[in-house]
Amino acid sequence: MSLPEYATVYNNFDAAALEAEILDGRLDSGLNVCHEICDKWATDPQRVALYYEKEGGGDGTLTFAELKEKSARFANYLKSRGIGKGDRVAGLLPRSPELLVVIAGALRAGAVYQPLFTAFGSGAIEYRLERADTKLVVTDPVNYPKLNDVKNCPPVLCLAAQQAGSDIPDFEQTLAEQSAEFEPVMVKGTDPFLQMFTSGTVGKAKGVAVPARALMAFYVYMKYAIDLRDDDTYWNVADPGWAYGLYYAVVGPLLMGHATHFNPGAFTPESTYDMIRKYKITNLAAAPTAYRLLKANDHVLPEGENLGLRVASSAGEPLNPEVVNWIRNRHYCPVKDHYGQTETGMTCCNFHGLEHPVRQGSMGYSSPGHKVVALNEKNEEVGEGEIGQLAVDVKASPLFHFDGYTWGEKDPFVNGYYLTGDMVICHGDGGFSFSGRDDDIITTAGYRVGPADVESTLLEHAAVAESGVVGKPDEKRGSIIKAYVVIKSGQEPSEDQALKDELQELVRRRLSTHAYPREIEFVDELPKTPSGKIQRFVLRNRAKDEAGA
Ligand code: ATP
Ligand code: MG
């Protein structure tokens, strides 16, 4: 199979030339990330960095020039508190202009920005602040009370502080007292600029420090996979409390001098469509859970309305083919699946910006600057049609930037490969399809079945909103496949057994006889991470309990 444009770009990728082009070749000599994502574009006073909707109504904009000024004030405040290079500064903030100011200001001071998702409770916040030895938290009156329960909480700055309590330092007032001039602090490409934690889908979240050289990989993703064009209006729905939102709703677009968009509040199909209509979004990015919710609420979009989307992108979980078809039919645009991790950013994608064949249900090909492969248990590359663990060949990946977990986790590097913990089917032409997380793969009667295929097949049934598929211990077969299924509202069957039979038959017919769920249970909701990923280990434990194992 020839991969015309993709192959040309991939094979001729030159990291040094890219560094020269976008970062003036300064990864070794020193650069400032805030300069790259803000100051560089602030010479045009009209250039907008952020369009935002306000909580409770109204909207606003923040220009790069305003962001430059405010971030300098915040950087001066950090300096006055002795906070600088390498120190962690956390934002526990909703999607708001202040959030951008805190990110940009921390980076201007050479500090490391640490996101805290606003849905976190005090335990999750404490865990992350303690591990990162965070020096300051910026929050708002809604989230402030959670910090009262955090042991050894670092100093706090609060937006509209008088609403949270009279003795708390106010963010706006503090900034107003600072000078608007601040000389950016230089960092090296190997120095961290973001302090992340993984999503905690299979257990405790792992600490990941992202070095400044990751800007190169972010740029490549925005350019080739998202295909962000000058005339695009781009909205990544993901919250910057997570890697997908912080890397590609904030850093990525701003690095290209592009405006980003924030809407407030939790995800709803109605507010999502309102936002797309109002800002004439052409380039959309969101997690599969968001797309699944749009599809399950199909009635919200008037029949025949074309929102004018040019392209859509998805990442974080498998993108079910049924959702792909729905978006093509209802939104008249292609949606492409991208694979990545907090640790590495996006490494395997279907590229909107590069011509190549797209296989149904596949997560695509290695990103330019990365080489991903699938390995067997002996860490040898597997052949076409085989399942293996997805790994990054570090030496062959000049844009690979993960150095290992910050706090005492198992070493994910073996023989020059970084092991992702995800199982994929190798297509032999450089393409891969996601099968499941290592722990999620089910062995039933000697066959290995990935939950992704079974879940995608169940989704083809009109009554299914989503499902989680796991192995349930079974004496005869080792495990049987069990599906926990959420039914679309208004579609509850009059008789459960008839629907179960239909679903089993569907998987038998569409996928294979050995992969059908012998047991189906209808549930109101699935256990998910705060970022919306299905936690199959919770379902697996439930199934184990049910089996009495
Ligand atoms: P933790 O590592 O703490 O258990 P997590 O792995 O979910 O959480 P993230 O870094 O947010 O944390 O997510 C990366 C993982 O998400 C990948 O390892 C993979 O399992 C899954 N993932 C990401 N993109 C895709 C995709 N396109 N298709 C299938 N799975 C994906
Ligand atoms: Mg992970």
Image (tube, rainbow, N blue to C red):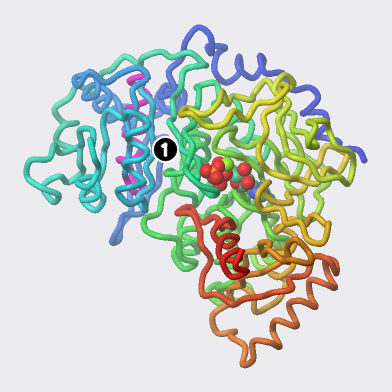
Picture quarter containing residue 219? Answer: top right
Residue at the image point whose x is 47% and y is 39% from the top: 246
In screen coordinates, is 106 left or right of 477? left
The spot of residue 237 in percent (x, y) is 49, 52
Residue at the farthest left position: 166
Image quadrant for the C terminus?
A: bottom right
User: Residue 435: percent from the left, percent from the top?
Assistant: 74, 51
Vertically, is 272 above or below 258?
A: below
Residue 95 belongs to the span the image colors magenta: yes
Pointer 1: what residue? 49
Is 471 in front, or is 281? Answer: 471
Query: Which quarter holds ligand 2?
Result: top right
**What kind of secondary structure does the magenta stretch mostly adopt?**
helix
Q: Nearer the viewer, residue 42 or 402?
A: 402
Q: Residue at x 63, y 35 (%)?
A: 221
Stretch of the chain drawn in magenta: 93-110
Residue in the picture at 71% in, 53% down: 441
Dividing the picture into quarters, in which one does residue 353 lie? top right
Which element carries disc 1, helix, strand or loop? strand
Q: Position of residue 398 (x, y in %)?
A: 68, 20
Q: Residue most toward the top?
A: 29
The quarter of the picture where the N terminus appears is top right
User: Is any atom of residue 231 visible in this view?
Assistant: no
Callout 1 crowding tier (Cα within 10 Å): few <14, some 14–19, many ≥20: many
Question: Does the segment drawn in magenta span residue 23?
Answer: no
How many badges with numbers are in the image? 1
> x, y percentage for residue 158?
20, 41
Residue 76, compared with residue 54, is above or below; it is: above
Q: Give amino acid for label 1.
A: Ala
Q: Is residue 389 left or right of residue 112?
A: right
